[in-house]
Amino acid sequence: MKPFPQLSSENLEDLKVKAQQWSLANGLVMYPPDFQTFNVSNAPITLFPTPIPKTAFEQAQLIQQTYNELYSKIVGDKEWLINEIKQLSQFDPEFTGRLFEIYNKVNEQGNFQPLSLGIFRSDYMLHDGKDIKQIEFNTVSVSFGGLSPKINELHTYLNDSGSYDNDYSYQYYDPEELPVSSSIKKIAEGISKGNYYYNDETDNTKTSILFIVQPNERNSFDQRHIEYELLKTHKLKSYRLTLEETIENTTINGDKLYMKKTMDEISVVYYRSGYGPGDYPNEKCWDARFQLENNKAIKCPSIITQLSGTKKIQQILTEKSNLSKYLNEETVDEISKTFVKIYPMDNSPEGEKAKKLAFEQPENFVLKPQREGGGNNIYKEDIPGFLKTLDEKNWEAYILMELINPPVHKNTIIRNNDIFTNDIISELGIFGSIVFDETNGDIKYNEYSGWLLRSKLATSNEGGVAAGFGCVDGIYLY
Ligand code: ADP
Ligand code: MG
């Protein structure tokens, strides 16, 4: 493994400016807090790519289609999944419960679209330096597929221009050591496949894609890169609405969803919002979700696919007997290798063990509720005190997960105009796209769709980039 490039402080400053200007010129950007629309900043990034072993990188990529398939099969096993979701709803009536209610209501009214589009991301850390271990499997609103190729291109540019060498004379990395993620291309392709199957297996470019986004989205450029690719390569127009704006701007005619102003028919509703209770501040937003679900447009993801990504389901799947319902022996082994121990917090023997462990060795665990999007977990020594604030019968709403022990590297981060060199740890996300029939699990399209590396300070528990904890990184393969 090569060490990180060593640069004089003068050259490092020069590198920072080069990275900032490349970012602004090529859309590796985010809106700052309280922004106006003309006003962007370079996205928080590392100046150097972080070393990742080739074998681990390839393993994570190879396994993605199996993960896609696994989640399509869980969703296809509807009776079982619905029973699980019912139980989760009891602990979380305000969010999971309400989503589940909408699912039931749509089913009763019959405007149900059996085809489902998943744009997934499986997140890993390297455990003890070599094996990938899964952090979580995301089935809704996965982000940074749009910015990931951009930072890879930035690192390639810095390398090709000699800027990683103190004398500006040679490429520090071999070009094949710096992979570029295909996530913009492949996520857009996945969405275009949703359009294709909506239109009875034709590439109809008269139907459009609807992005459901958060108000004041700071990460809109990440989404825009996907939209530009949809239009350029697949000739598909896209619209953007927040949940608040949805009722006023869409209409259902027969069983189809249209944009009111243009009467453009929507083939795919792509959710980049709607994954947490904060996305539904009022009833109008819940009405919007019902409106979006109650028609034949293909949802990315459907409610039931969204809920299959909860941490409780992830925990259930770590039990081999459950996993082998869906996969053959060989793939069960491949997938199981990526698991660390996850315990339920219920009255089962495993649950009782977990309740003891949470108090006796909390330093080895993270406690997770059924929530997405960062900032919800309870780490290490905070676990016992937190549990004590709850009624024991509510502990069941959580899972207890063994902590992964990732390698630490010293990389340099730029955030706005600040530059600092620090110990970081990295999380590898692998994207996957799938179109499948929810009623029978029949798979129409299933692909690996690129990757993302995010890094955070080794001293911080959480890693969200948009939340201000982390940054977008690239890979140096060794
Ligand atoms: P969220 O749905 O909020 O993204 P995650 O399960 O991804 O929840 O956890 C958030 C962050 O916490 C991760 O990005 C990772 O940095 C850290 N984390 C979560 N689980 C583990 C674990 N088992 N070991 C080490 N770090 C973890
Ligand atoms: Mg996460």
Image (spheres, rainbow, N blue to C red):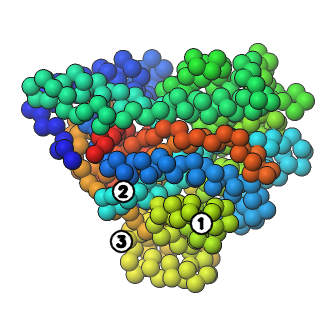
Q: Secondary structure at mark 3?
A: helix
Instruction: Give the residue at mark 1.
Output: 329
Residue 476 visible in the picture: yes
N-term-proximal mark, 1 vs 2: 2
Image quadrant of residue 268? top right
Image quadrant of residue 446? top right
Query: Looking at the rendered structure, which numbered label has been put on residue 363?
Result: 3
Instruction: Give the residue at mark 2.
Output: 126
Query: Looking at the rendered structure, which numbered label has been put on residue 440?
Result: none
Q: Secondary structure at mark 2?
A: strand
State how far apart marks 2 and 3 are (Cα).
19 Å
Density class for disc 1 (Cα within 10 Å; few <14, some 14-19, many ≥20) is: few
Image quadrant of residue 301? top right
Residue at 47 percent of width and 46 percent of height: 61
**Whether residue 271 is situated above or below residue 321 in the rendered picture:** above
Residue 274 visible in the picture: no
Q: Are marks 2 and 3 in contact (CB under 8 Å)?
A: no
Q: Secondary structure at mark 1?
A: helix
State how far apart marks 1 and 2 are (Cα).
24 Å
Residue 391 at x, y percent in the picture:
59, 75
Q: Determine the residue located farthest toward the front in the rendered image.
A: 330
Density class for disc 3 (Cα within 10 Å; few <14, some 14-19, many ≥20) is: some
Nearer the viewer's eye, disc 1 or disc 2?
A: 1
N-term-proximal mark, 1 vs 3: 1
The amino acid type found where label 3 is placed reads Glu
Residue at 54 percent of width and 53 percent of height: 137
* 79 left or right, relative to 26: right
Q: Any atom of ligand 1 within 8 Å of the CB at mark 3?
A: no
Residue 374 at x, y percent in the picture:
48, 50
The amino acid type found where label 1 is placed reads Glu
Of residues 81 and 186, the one nearer the viewer is: 186
